[in-house]
Every structure is written in C-alpha cells, then in structure tokens.
Amino acid sequence: MDNALVTCENLVKIYTATDLEVVALQGLDLEIAPGEMVALVGASGSGKTTLLNLLGALDSPSAGRCIVAGNDLTRINDLQRTNYRCFTAGHVWQQSGRNLLPELSVAENIALPQMLGGANAKARSARTRDLMARTDIERLAEKKPNQISGGEQQRAAICVALANAPALLLADEPTGELDSTTAGEVLDLLRELNRELGLTILIVTHDVTVASGADRTIAIRDGRTSTETVRRDAPLAAAGIGSAAGAASAVIGLPSQTHRESILIDRVGRLQLPHEALTRVAFNGRADVRILDDHVEIWPEEGAAEGLAAPSAAIPVAPTYPAAAANYPAPIQEEN
C-alpha cells in the first residue's frame, strides 16, 4: 500500500534473558491506512503488546522493517525516537496509573506533554480546552485523577495521548478495567475522534464488542498476523443466505452477517489456518495444494493422494484483500 501510515514487513522481535531467547514476533506483516480504526486480537503471548511497543517506539525491532508516518523505527536514533514518541504516536494504557500523573490536575496532565513539546502557554491552554470539550470533561479540569471515575480517567488519558496531535493512537485494552456501559461510551468516543479528526487508531483488545466497532480486526497468532475480519458495508439479511448466516468468525466470534473474515497470506506465501480447520480436518503436518484457474485448494495429503473429492475435506483459501481503507466497505454508521 503506497499511502500506508503503518507498514511492517517481516518484523521480528527477539527477547533475550540469560541463556534463553524468546521470539515474540516471527516475521509479522501489517499495513494500516491513514484514518483506519483497527482492532488487534489474539491469545496472551501472541505478540500483541510487543507489536504495540514497537509501533510506539518503546522498544526496537530485532529485524525486519517498521515504518510509521515516514519514520523508519529500525533506524532512528535516540533523539528521533523521543520526538517520535512526543509527536507521532500517542498511547492509552489499560491502567489509569500509566496514563495520568496523580499529583497533577486533569488540565495539567493534558498540558504537560505540550509543554515538553515546546508549545507556549497560550497554545497549551487553547489545545487543552479543545480536547476537554471534545471528550466532555471540561468540568473536571481542576480535579485530580483520584477524584474522578474510571471512565473519566480514560477520557482524560485520551486527551493526554492526543495533546500533541499524533498521527497514530495506540490503545492497549483501553476499556479493560471499565464496566460494559462505560466501556461502550469510551469506544464511541474513540470512533467519534477517528471520524472527526481522521485519527488512525490501533486497539489491542479481548472484547468482541470493541473489535466489532473497528473497521478491521487483525488476529495475531504465534507472532504473525493470521486472519483479518472486515466490517461489511451493510449487514447481510438473515433470510435466504443459508445456514452460514449465523456463523461466527473463527478467531474472535464476530458474526458473518456483519463481518467478513479472510486468512492473511504474507509476502512469502505463508498462512495460518484457523484452529477450527486444523481440528476438523486431519492434515498431519502436510497438505496437497491445488492451483486452479481462479482459486487455490488445500487438501489433506493422504486424501488428495487417494483422489478423494468430498467437499467437506477441502479448505478453500480466499484471496486476501489490499489493506487500504478505500478498498474496504465503509464502516456501518451507528445511530445516535
């Protein structure tokens, strides 16, 4: 994608502790277009937080390519890394203690990154008022973090993350400590900011509700992107579309009426079949690949050798789609 805001190619991250090496990312590929809201899902230890730390320049890749808004995160020096964290990528963490300084008021927390970025007092004050108005926390300007609710703390944290107008907002389980009602309100706010400001957002989540609100949901498994689920431009009608209408996606459980799931194929042709496919069909570590005119089929090697042609044994591999926002169905417009 030529206009991608985020491009990861064969991204590798290896952690070393004494004599032990842990490969957290194993050749991950990812592209995010400007203005997209993308959810990142996967089991614990799959590499989600590692990827977020790399994109936020809180850690450095071991190999591969990682470019965000023209910044090559595999090559930047310490000063460039500091400027990147200040102006290009904003963070919202699950724990409020990582987002806000307890000794400062809400307004002071929002003004602090602007001051560190060199903004004068007049500009800081105007930007702080604007962000608080957008997030409906103007009345909390003089409150300390321990004097406001969890949802209000996350709204303030979003303001802090956006203080210097970053191109990318990284949110690690931003609704993880909130009740369902408050979590929905914070998610609605993120979607509103995404639409109004053209803000690109990447959210790590385990919550199906959060994932359903994103333009795309990317699943990571064993350090690689495995599947992609895209919101349909309009829900499929329940009647007349067969028994698959009520089926859920193989990874996070998003309904097929509103989302379309695809297996991702990386630049060297690797793909990860969903766990459901591996449990239903006995591949035993090998597969026969049939390249036909308009599609590819993957068959268990033994069944292919015997010439079996039962449709239930084949796992068709759908083509992947380019990760450009213009090529995806428009997000469903929720009613206010």
Image (cartoon, helix red, strand yellow):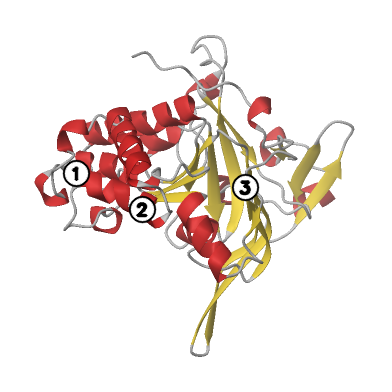
Whether tag 3 and tag 1 are in contact, CB under 8 A, the answer is no
Q: Which mark is residue 280?
A: none
Name the one closer to the observer, 293 or 190. Answer: 190
Q: Disc 1 designates what residue?
A: 150
State if disc 3 and disc 2 touch (CB < 8 Å).
no
Secondary-structure class at tag 3: loop
> In the rendering, at what x and y percent does residue 16 appear?
52, 81
The residue that mark 3 highlights is 69
In the shown orientation, is residue 45 left or right of residue 159?
Answer: right
- The mark lying in front, picked from 2 and 1, is 2
Residue furthest toward the left? 147
Q: Residue at x 39, y 57 (%)?
A: 116
Identity, as a three-letter code, of the amino acid under mark 1? Gly
Q: Give percent across and percent down for residue 198.
A: 52, 30
Image quadrant in which you'd find residue 150: top left
Q: The residue tagged with tag 1: helix, strand or loop?
A: helix
Q: Could you say which is closer to the camera, residue 174 or residue 81?
A: 81
Q: Amino acid at mark 3?
A: Ala
Disc 2 designates what residue?
A: 115
Question: Residue at 60% of width from left, 67% of height from top?
Answer: 61
Residue 262 sits in which quadrant?
top right
* Numbered disc 2: secondary structure: helix
User: Which amino acid, mark 2?
Assistant: Met
